[in-house]
Amino acid sequence: MTALARPTHGRMFGGVCAALAQRFHTSATTMRVIFVVSCLLPGPQFLLYLALWALLPSEGKARQAAW
């Protein structure tokens, strides 16, 4: 199992959807569509995205911390 980290390649804004796509073994496009559709529902989805963006380390920093 890999650690959850924002990838340096294949991300659009913050890399949160790309990180979640890697974690759940799906495409980043699928995860982005799920996120956009979920934003149409009531709830704190955008705030959760911002929190994950702030809390998840970038892939390069996560590799350095593992050493």
Image: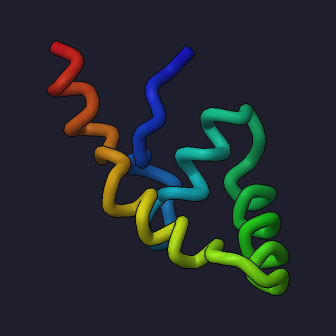
Taking the view exactly as shown, the residue that stands out farthest to the front is 43
Q: Residue at x 42, y 64 (%)?
A: 51
Residue 52 picture quarter: bottom left
Q: Is residue 29 left or right of residue 10?
A: right
Residue 17 picture quarter: bottom right
Q: Residue at x 71, y 77 (%)?
A: 43
Count of numbered circles on the image: 0
Across and down, in percent, residue 56 comes to 37, 48
Q: Is residue 47 left or right of residue 60?
A: right
Across and down, in percent, residue 60 comes to 25, 38
Residue 54 picture quarter: bottom left
Q: Is residue 33 above or below residue 60?
A: below
Across and down, in percent, residue 65 comes to 17, 25
Query: Which color mode does the image show?
Result: rainbow
Query: 48 or 35, which is in the foreground?
Result: 48
Q: Residue at x 54, y 66 (%)?
A: 48
Q: Quadrant of the N terminus?
A: top right
Q: Is residue 24 left or right of residue 37?
A: left
Q: Quadrant of the C terminus?
A: top left
Across and down, in percent, residue 4 comes to 47, 35
Q: Is residue 55 above or below residue 50?
A: above
Q: Residue at x 20, y 38 (%)?
A: 61
